[in-house]
């Protein structure tokens, strides 16, 4: 029996009926231990939503979220709940999200702004809802409204909602709020003010509200097939994915012009325009590509994309483009794991998502299930750039010690060289002619490395790394090569390694190290 239940929960597909999905959700409501098995159905791209109309998708998601009131809200589900409260206006979906928050172990002050945004959105879309059973289009069993559910969550929050009580008071005076609802809002405010609960900044018993940014580290999904993705921009210019998304970091967002939610695509493009201005102010204009890719390539023509972007302040040019995918859309969606689903060729719902690609076109970081801010993206770009510079610095740090190692242990005469090569099975005498000339080249490269350290004294970590590397260089050239003091080889290499590593440290870390050493 237990196996059958688990199988039923995990096997919902695009072919499952609404009633079958509701039955599974009801099963989890009765058996809260199974709640985590519902988590895979929260991402918008899950196949269970494929081929369904937008209204059906919202009903399913609303009923699914409301289930967490009874089972408890897992931490991994919270970002999806907050995304709904922040970006949606559908009454049933917002009511389900409001109920889900009441499944948390305790209310948190950080949740109040999300609830307030939902309350304002429902001024225009408030409707009767019922979660006692599967969605009923007519004659709900327990009649309530989405705004009632939001206010109920505010009452549950108590003093954790004190920061928004003035905003709630203003909302109660809105012309779109009728007298009974205004009275209920005032009663809610009174309850918030009278609440005796005290909330402190503690990690105990709380679900983290700050949603972690997506981080992809060194993941490289870029396969050869990505080169087959073809894009067409707002000027009808075709370009390969690999041609645009390489050479410099790129900010990628998704949108489509038929989106009827002003808090999603329209706001995303508006924010891209703000990001352009922020990049100019930060001195990063021209150093970063921006790409807005349409979910709806069949409908979004070049002209539609261009007008849509320009009306919202996103100015397209060589480095800032709107794209529709003309070939390879499934590959692109798989690469980004895009939060979108379709009924036929029409988008039925989607997430808010932004990604930062590095100069090689690999996904370095991203934001999903939340509204992003321009400064947040600039910080991500700077982190990606710093990370890449860090890798380069580590490579340079190893260069000097490796060169010195080769200089020290490189054979000093043709007979020694022949012995080295014979171990590898190589007896070609032509190699001996040029190999003996390689040692001066290695010394010259070591000198170039020292020159680079000297020129970076004022921009990196001062004179100490240079002096240490100079001591190591002197030991290699004078003591080892000049005076044939083999014992000086290891200390000299160690000095070169120490100098290079000190120079590669982030400046803040280097300063902290100096303080520890009282230097």
Image: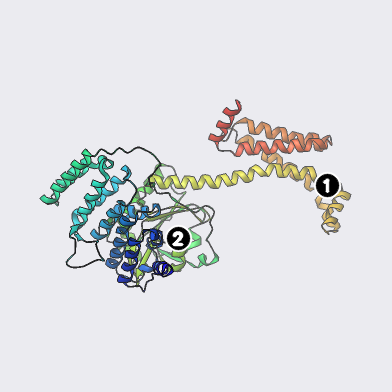
The x, y position of residue 78, in whole percent, is 36, 52
Closest to the observer, 134 or 145: 134
On the rendered structure, is 319 left or right of 149? right
Compare residues 92 and 22 and report the one nearer the observer: 22
Q: Is 342 situated left or right of 500 in this image? A: left
Question: Is 480 located above or below residue 24 in the figure?
Answer: above
Q: Residues within 10 Å of mark 1 (few under 14, many from 20)?
A: some
Q: In which quadrant is the N terminus drawn?
A: bottom left
Find disc 2 in the rendering and name its residue: 336
- In front of the other: label 1 or label 2? 2
432 left or right of 28 in image: right
Q: Residues within 10 Å of mark 2 (few under 14, many from 20)?
A: some
Residue 452 placement (x, y as % from top left): 64, 39
Question: What number is the disc on residue 517?
Answer: none
| Residue in the picture at 64% in, 42% down | 397
Q: Position of residue 165 (x, y in %)?
A: 22, 41
Mark carried by residue 411: 1
Residue with the most extreme bottom position = 15
Mark 2 lies on a secondary structure that is: helix
| Vertical arrangement, residue 506 with respect to residue 345, above or below | above
Residue drawn at point x = 48 percent, y = 59 percent: 244
Could you tell me residue 14's position as x and y percent?
37, 71
Q: Quarter of the image containing the C terminus?
A: top right
> Which residue is situated farthest in the front direction here?
1
Q: Is residue 165 visible?
A: yes
Given residues 417 and 363, the one toward you in this image is 363
Q: What is the CA distance from the residue labelled 1 to the residue labelled 2?
A: 52 Å
Work out whether mark 1 precedes mark 2 in sequence or the reverse, and give the earlier one.
Answer: 2
């Amino acid at each position: 029996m237990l196996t059958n239940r688990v199988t039923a929960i995990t096997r919902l597909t695009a072919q499952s009926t609404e009633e079958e999905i509701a039955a599974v959700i009801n099963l989890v409501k009765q058996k809260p231990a199974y709640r985590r098995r519902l988590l895979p159905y929260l991402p918008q791209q899950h196949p269970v939503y494929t081929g369904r109309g937008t209204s059906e998708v919202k009903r399913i998601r609303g009923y699914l979220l409301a289930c967490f009131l009874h089972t408890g809200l897992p931490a991994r589900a919270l970002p999806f709940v907050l995304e709904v409260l922040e970006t949606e206006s559908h009454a049933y979906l917002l009511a389900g999200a409001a109920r889900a928050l009441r499944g948390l172990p305790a209310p948190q002050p950080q949740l109040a702004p999300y609830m307030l945004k939902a309350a304002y959105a429902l001024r225009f879309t408030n409707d009767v809802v019922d979660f006692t059973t599967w969605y009923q289009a007519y004659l709900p069993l327990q009649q309530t409204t989405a705004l009632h559910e939001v206010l109920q969550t505010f009452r549950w929050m108590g003093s954790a909602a004190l920061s928004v009580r003035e905003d709630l008071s203003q909302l109660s005076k809105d012309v779109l709020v009728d007298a009974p609802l205004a009275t209920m809002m005032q009663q809610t405010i009174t309850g918030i003010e009278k609440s005796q609960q005290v909330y402190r900044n503690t990690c105990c018993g709380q679900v983290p509200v700050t949603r972690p940014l997506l981080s992809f580290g060194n993941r490289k999904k870029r396969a050869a097939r990505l080169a087959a993705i073809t894009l067409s921009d707002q000027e009808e210019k075709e370009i390969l994915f690999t041609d645009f998304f390489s050479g410099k970091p790129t900010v990628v967002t998704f949108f489509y012009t038929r989106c009827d939610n002003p808090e999603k695509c329209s706001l995303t493009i508006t924010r891209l325009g703000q990001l352009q201005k922020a990049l100019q102010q930060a001195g990063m204009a021209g150093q970063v590509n921006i790409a807005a890719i349409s979910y709806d390539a069949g409908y979004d023509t070049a002209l539609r994309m261009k007008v849509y972007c320009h009306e919202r302040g996103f100015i397209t040019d060589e480095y800032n483009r709107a794209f529709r995918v003309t070939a390879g859309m499934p590959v692109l969606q798989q690469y980004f794991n895009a939060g979108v689903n379709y009924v036929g060729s029409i988008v039925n719902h989607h997430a808010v998502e932004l990604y930062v690609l590095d100069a090689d076109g690999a996904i370095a970081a991203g934001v999903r299930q939340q509204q992003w801010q321009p400064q947040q993206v600039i910080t991500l770009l700077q982190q990606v750039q710093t990370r890449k510079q860090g890798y380069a610095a580590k490579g340079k740090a190893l260069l000097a010690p490796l060169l010195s190692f080769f200089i020290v242990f490189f054979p000093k005469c043709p007979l020694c060289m022949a012995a080295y090569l014979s171990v590898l099975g190589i007896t070609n005498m032509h190699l001996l002619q040029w190999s003996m000339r390689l040692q001066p080249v290695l010394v010259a490269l070591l000198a170039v490395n020292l020159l680079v350290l000297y020129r970076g004294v004022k921009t990196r970590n001062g004179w100490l790394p240079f002096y240490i590397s100079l001591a190591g260089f002197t030991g290699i050239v004078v003591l080892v090569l000049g005076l044939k003091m083999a014992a000086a080889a290891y200390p000299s290499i160690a000095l070169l390694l120490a100098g290079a590593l000190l120079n590669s440290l982030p400046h803040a870390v280097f300063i902290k190290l100096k303080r520890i050493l009282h230097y």
